[in-house]
Image: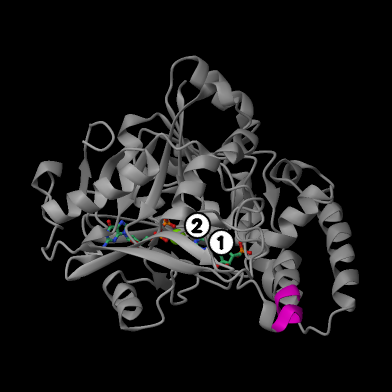
């Protein structure tokens, strides 16, 4: 049981990057298992903020191995930009990072297709990050993808051209203007950079190393409510963001999984379209956005904000088998006099604690109101020193979810983290 998983329980941006970075010293390997450059994982130390898209969040620790697993989709041009941004010498990075030969490539035309599909949808658009994620996973599943291992083949350029040809045929039926060449140069530059890294069948590597007692942390992207099967479909991403996705996205058996860490914010946010029952289109929502700096790490878009949604959180815990909860951003609500938590919904005049099948079902949240802590908590490092009102808020969540909150993050920096070892509800 040498592999733990860390994943988001809401609509993404729960603080995964920060917490993976904090946990990395306790692991040997950090491995991303799904998603692609739609992700934006921020972490902060020494007063510098870093945002990662494809590269696992353990990369700043020199002695750790980071793996981009087979379940990830990689855009070489984003990869290149990110590598250059890191300001770590490429030779050094090549020691820290390995890429799965089976990871699928995002082609320049995937980005164009993503934009064309969204344009076509008009008002019903998903609000994609337009990074080509949907079309790249579509090609993977329909067995039309190109994989990282293919870039080492002599006929790679021909393979690439064949794929593009198909995409251009599809694009002909869309009234959508595009410039493929604009993307292509950067993309091929990225391919050359990718070749300088170790590309391997990482499923062997992960299993061998875990078998020898090395500890692996599998890093999720997005969040459970954006999962292609269990999220608010069709307003989701195109991969399995849930714990099962770590098995398919790294090539590991469920037997090897130990802890499943579920991260959630003390409130909720969502970027893009789709249901958000506890959304606040008022001053409180604006305060959450301003105080929490809720603007997308990848697209810069303003995040929609609302109260914590317990039915959604409980659903995510169930789907993932979460063993430990990590709560972030309670510090954002330090000035709030009262705080609400949604405990159930009213739908069609009936009370329900379940997530409905239909994305357009009208859900009226039922709230419990709790007193706020009205204290700056960002300097606190000992769980016992947290204000009683915040401990009650945490206790309320633990009672409802029956999972212990074992970590509380009180700010974006590595240091602003409180670990706690104790049983549920104590
Ligand atoms: P991720 O996609 O789950 O890694 O999350 P993002 O990085 O997209 O968004 C989380 C944002 O909240 C980032 O700007 C983090 O620096 C910040 N953050 C993480 N944890 C905390 C916290 O406990 N308090 C505050 N105030 N900010 C946090
Ligand atoms: P991290 O890993 C928040 C959202 C998009 C859109 C939907 C589909 O940083 O938590 P896609 O580009 O996948 O076709 O977009 O999913 N989305 C995210 N929202 N955080 C993310 O990643 C996201 N990745 C995708 O806004 O609504
Ligand atoms: Mg993010």
Q: Seen in the image, is 333 located left or right of residue 381?
A: right
In the displayed structure, 64 sits above or below 279; it is above
Residue 60 visible from this viewpoint:
no
Q: Is mark 1 within 8 Å of ligand 2?
A: yes
Q: Seen in the image, is 318 located left or right of residue 265?
A: right
In the displayed structure, 41 sits above or below 119; it is above
State which quadrant residue 126 falls in: bottom right
Which residue appears at 25% of the width and 38% of the height?
425
Q: Nearer the viewer, mark 1 or mark 2?
A: 1
Q: Quadrant of the C terminus?
A: top left
Residue 119 is covered by the magenta coloring: yes
Circle 1 Cα neighbour tier, 10 Å, few/some/many (<14 / 14–19 / ≥20): many
Image coords of residue 221 (percent x, y):
51, 51
Residue 360 visible from this viewpoint:
yes
Q: Are marks 1 and 2 in contact (CB under 8 Å)?
A: yes
Asked which secondary structure carries label 2, the reply is: loop
State which quadrant residue 406 falls in: top left
Q: Who is closer to the viewer here, 384 or 194?
A: 384
Span shown in magenta? 117-122
Question: Residue 53, which numbered label?
Answer: 2
């Amino acid at each position: 049981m040498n592999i733990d998983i860390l994943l988001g329980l809401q609509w993404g941006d729960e603080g995964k990057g920060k917490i993976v970075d904090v946990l990395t010293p306790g692991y040997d390997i950090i491995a991303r298992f799904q998603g692609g450059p739609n992700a934006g994982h921020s972490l902060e130390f020494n007063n510098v903020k870093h945002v990662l898209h494809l590269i696992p969040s353990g990369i700043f620790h020199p002695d750790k191995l980071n793996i981009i697993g087979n379940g990830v989709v990689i855009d070489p041009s984003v990869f290149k930009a990110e590598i250059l941004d890191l300001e770590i010498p490429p030779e050094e990075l090549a020691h820290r990072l390995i890429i799965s030969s089976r990871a699928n490539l995002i082609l320049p035309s995937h980005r164009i297709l993503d934009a064309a599909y969204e344009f076509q949808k008009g008002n019903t658009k998903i609000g994609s990050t337009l990074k080509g994620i949907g079309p790249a996973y579509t090609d993977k599943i329909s067995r039309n993808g190109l994989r990282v291992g293919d870039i080492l083949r002599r006929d790679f350029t021909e393979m690439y051209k064949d794929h593009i040809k198909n995409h251009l045929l599809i694009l002909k039926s869309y009234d959508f203007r595009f410039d493929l060449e604009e993307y292509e140069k950067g993309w091929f530059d990225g391919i050359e950079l990718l070749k300088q890294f170790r590309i391997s069948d990482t499923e062997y590597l992960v299993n061998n190393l875990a078998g020898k007692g090395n500890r692996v942390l599998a890093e999720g992207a997005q969040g459970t409510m954006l999962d292609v099967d269990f999220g608010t479909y069709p307003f989701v991403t195109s991969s399995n963001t849930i714990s099962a996705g770590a098995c398919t996205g790294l090539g590991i058996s469920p037997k090897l999984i130990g802890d499943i860490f579920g991260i959630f914010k003390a409130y909720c946010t969502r970027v893009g379209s789709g249901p958000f029952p506890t959304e606040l289109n008022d001053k409180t929502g604006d305060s959450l956005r301003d105080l929490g700096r809720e603007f997308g790490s990848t697209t810069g878009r303003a995040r929609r904000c609302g109260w914590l949604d317990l039915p959604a959180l409980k659903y995510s815990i169930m789907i993932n088998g979460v063993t430990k909860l990590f709560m972030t951003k309670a510090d954002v609500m330090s000035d709030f006099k009262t705080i609400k938590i949604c405990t159930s919904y009213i739908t069609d005049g009936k009370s329900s604690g379940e997530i409905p099948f239909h994305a357009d079902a009208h859900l009226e949240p039922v709230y419990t109101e709790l007193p706020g802590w009205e204290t700056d908590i960002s300097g606190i490092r000992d769980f016992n020193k947290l204000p009683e009102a915040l401990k009650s808020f945490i206790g309320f969540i633990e009672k409802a979810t029956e999972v212990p909150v074992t970590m509380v993050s009180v700010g974006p920096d590595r240091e602003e983290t409180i670990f706690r070892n104790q049983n549920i509800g104590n």
